[in-house]
Every structure is written in structure tokens, then in C-alpha cells.
Image: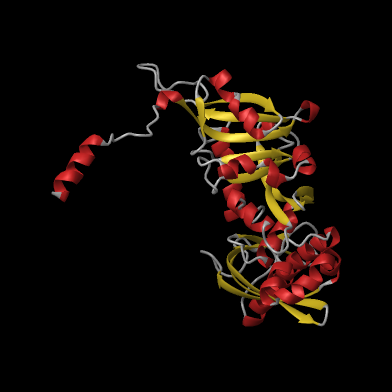
């Protein structure tokens, strides 16, 4: 009897109770948020436009995306005006990036600004978040180099800059809320800017720094590598070791693996930080070193350790000057001793600026590549 009832129920209930036709939706690939006139928000929404091949004449040369520009007192008001121009409702489930213009990021609380994307059920919290130097909309207007849309190009540029070069961070909507809802809410977001030499391209490098929800400055790309090492988030990159006595010449080593352990220590109301890092490297270029003995290898290892230590120390000093703890020391103290953190929290910015870091690095050379441990085309004696 129960089986018959369930069978009848299946026949009664429709199969597509919440279906949408593809022709009713415009799939969003990227969004740009800028400061508009009269305090309004200027929203640029990049919609994917399928471009089918034309029979007999090769693929279509039309752009694969269009940009819809709307404004509103809030993000949601600007979003509601998209169908006026597009003739379709925006579909947010396939969005790749959200780009915020620097002017707006410095003026508005980014948590409140992005509230729509956290609250609506369609956007994924894995969407990449980027801050743009100048106009965010201007970046979405550029033509993609190898991807179908500019939104996808921005995503890939940011991913490669993080995974392969260590020049920026992997920041998503989820990453931002985790940073800002932590015990210490200083945050860092991927940064992108127009290439000065080629106006049609952009560079994903550096980090936008946030304090109390508002952007306070930019951490240069050369300091980002050291920060990623401190955060144990460094995936791959290159370390340059200067050739002694040869101005402008350096040798390159590829960092294959780098693991960092960081431990705050409390003594009364003062904190010190112990940093221990281990790295496996491969020789990429040799110009002034010949590794013929263990002593030669030990000397190159020493120089590499000093350079990596210098990179981390440089990042620490830069962040201490800005009184911005995106290394996460305050959060570690909170997890270690919540009661002590409660006493230190109000003055942590100043205390962080004076905190002493003990940084040590151990390097191991695991390969010299396909050539011997000396310059391939060394000068004749």
C-alpha cells in the first residue's frame, strides 16, 4: 500500500519545479564596483555572450562578453537595473571575479559593500576578490589575451601570480570573511593594475591592505613573497642571489617547497615571534658560481638562506611600519591564550609594530638541473 502511495506521489509532483530557461538568464562572468557620482555605486557587470561559429566562414570574431553599466545607492539597486538593458535576469552562479576600484575600497566598508554577494543564494563564496588600482570597470573593458572573457582572464592572471610566482594572494569571498571575522580583523586582498608599457594588459601583483574594513594601502609585490613565506602559503617562485663584485648580475634558484612554522611567545605583556623555515630549491641559473666541492655548495646555500631570511624580514618591517598584522600573529596569540589576547587587543597595532621576530631558514639544493653544478658556457681560462 505504501509503495503504491509513493508511486502516485512521484507521478503527481512535477519534475522541474524551479527550472529556468537559458534564454531567460544572462550568465555573469565578472563584476566591477566603483565610486559613482553623488555617492552612488557604479556597477559594471560582464555577461557571457555565446558566439557560435558561422557556417563556412570560420569562427565568429565577435566578443564573447558584453558589459552592462548600472548605478544605484546600493549594490542590489544597481543589480535590479541590469534587465532593463540586457533583457534577461543576471545569473550569478558562474561568476569568476569581483573587482573593487581602489577609490571605493578606501571609502566604503568592504564588508558592507559586498553584503549582497554573501547574502544572495547564487554567488559562490569561492569567487575571487580583487582590488584594482584606478577604475575597476576599465579593467573589465580590456580584451582578454587567451581566455574567452576578461573576467576569466583576471581570474587566471591572479591564480598564476599566486601559484607560480608568489606575487599576490589567493583571496576569495570566503577568505575575506574569515580574515575580517577573526580575533584581529586586518585583511589583505589581491591587487591588480594596468600595465604601463601595454595599456591593453594588466598585472596581478601586490596586495591591498585593509584595516577595520577600509583599504589603507598597498603592499608591493616584492614584499608579498616574504609575507606568503611567513604565512606558510608560498607555493612556488624564484630567489635571486647576487653575484659578489658583479653589479647587476645574479643567480637564480627555483623554490620547489617551502614550509614555515611560526610561533609567538609571550613574556608578560610582550610578545616575540619565532619563525623557522625549510626550503628545497633547484638551481635555475648559474653565472658566477661553480659547485665542485661541498664547500662551494654550502656557500651557495648560505647565500640563499640569507636572501630568503631577508625577504621575510623585509615583509615584517614593511607591515610593522604600517601597523598592519596580516601575518596573523594576533590571531595566533588569541588561539594560544584568549584571556591574554583580550588584554592586548586594544593596543595590538602599536605592540605589533615593536614585536621582535627571530627568523631562521634552512635550505637544501636538491638538483642542479640537466647540467653540472657550474655555468654551462663558462669563460675559458
Residue visible at 57% across and 19% down in the picture: 84
Q: Quadrant of residue 135?
A: top right
89 vs 313, left or right, is left
Residue 44 in view in this figure: no
Q: From the viewer's perspective, is residue 192 above or below residue 327?
A: above
Residue 68: percent from left, percent from top: 60, 24
Q: From the viewer's perspective, is residue 139 above or below residue 59?
A: below
Of residues 349 and 73, the one drawn nearer to the viewer in this rendering: 73
Instruction: Say which quadrant the C terminus sits in.
Output: bottom right
Residue visible at 35% across and 34% down in the picture: 17
Residue 176: percent from left, percent from top: 64, 52
Q: Quadrant of residue 230?
A: bottom right
Q: From the viewer's perspective, is residue 59 above or below residue 149?
A: above
Residue 357: percent from left, percent from top: 78, 74
289 vs 66, left or right, is right
Which residue is most to the front? 1
Of residues 217 and 81, the one drawn nearer to the viewer in this rendering: 81
Residue visible at 39% across and 16% down in the picture: 57
Residue 18 in view in this figure: yes
User: Which colour scheme appears in the figure?
Assistant: secondary structure
Amino acid at each position: 500500500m505504501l509503495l503504491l502511495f509513493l508511486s502516485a506521489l512521484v507521478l503527481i509532483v512535477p519534475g522541474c519545479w524551479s527550472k529556468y530557461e537559458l534564454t531567460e538568464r544572462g550568465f555573469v562572468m565578472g563584476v566591477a564596483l566603483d565610486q559613482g557620482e553623488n555617492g552612488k555605486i557604479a556597477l559594471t557587470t560582464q555577461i557571457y555572450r555565446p558566439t557560435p561559429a558561422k557556417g563556412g566562414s570560420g569562427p565568429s570574431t565577435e566578443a564573447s562578453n558584453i558589459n552592462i553599466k548600472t548605478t544605484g545607492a546600493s549594490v542590489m539597486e544597481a543589480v535590479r537595473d541590469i534587465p532593463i538593458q540586457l533583457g534577461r535576469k543576471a545569473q550569478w552562479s558562474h561568476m569568476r571575479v569581483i573587482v573593487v576600484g581602489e577609490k571605493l575600497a578606501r571609502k566604503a566598508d568592504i564588508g558592507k559593500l559586498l553584503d549582497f554577494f554573501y547574502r544572495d543564494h547564487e554567488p559562490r563564496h569561492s569567487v575571487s576578490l580583487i582590488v584594482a588600482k584606478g577604475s575597476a570597470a576599465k579593467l573589465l573593458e580590456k580584451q582578454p589575451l587567451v581566455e574567452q572573457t576578461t573576467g576569466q582572464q583576471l581570474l587566471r592572471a591572479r591564480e598564476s601570480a599566486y601559484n607560480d610566482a608568489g606575487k599576490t594572494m589567493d583571496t576569495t569571498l570566503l577568505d575575506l570573511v574569515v580574515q575580517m571575522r577573526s580575533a584581529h580583523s586586518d585583511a589583505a586582498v589581491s591587487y591588480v593594475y594596468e600595465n604601463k608599457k601595454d595599456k591593453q594588459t594588466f598585472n596581478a601583483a601586490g596586495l591591498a591592505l585593509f584595516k577595520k574594513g577600509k583599504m589603507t594601502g598597498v603592499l608591493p609585490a616584492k614584499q608579498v613573497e616574504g609575507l606568503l613565506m611567513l604565512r606558510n602559503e608560498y607555493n612556488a617562485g624564484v630567489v635571486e642571489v647576487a653575484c659578489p663584485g658583479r653589479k647587476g648580475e645574479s643567480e637564480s634558484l627555483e623554490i620547489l617547497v617551502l614550509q614555515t612554522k611560526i610561533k609567538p611567545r609571550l613574556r608578560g605583556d610582550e610578545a616575540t615571534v619565532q619563525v623557522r623555515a625549510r626550503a628545497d630549491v633547484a638551481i635555475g641559473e648559474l653565472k658566477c658560481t661553480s659547485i665542485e666541492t661541498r664547500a662551494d655548495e654550502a656557500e651557495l646555500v648560505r647565500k640563499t638562506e640569507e636572501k630568503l631570511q631577508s625577504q621575510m624580514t623585509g615583509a615584517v618591517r614593511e607591515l610593522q611600519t604600517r601597523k598592519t598584522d596580516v601575518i596573523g600573529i594576533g590571531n595566533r596569540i588569541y588561539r594560544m591564550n584568549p584571556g591574554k589576547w583580550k588584554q592586548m587587543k586594544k593596543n595590538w597595532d602599536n605592540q605589533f609594530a615593536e614585536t621582535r621576530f627571530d627568523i631562521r631558514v634552512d635550505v637544501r639544493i636538491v638538483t642542479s638541473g640537466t647540467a653540472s653544478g657550474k655555468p654551462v658556457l663558462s669563460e675559458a681560462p
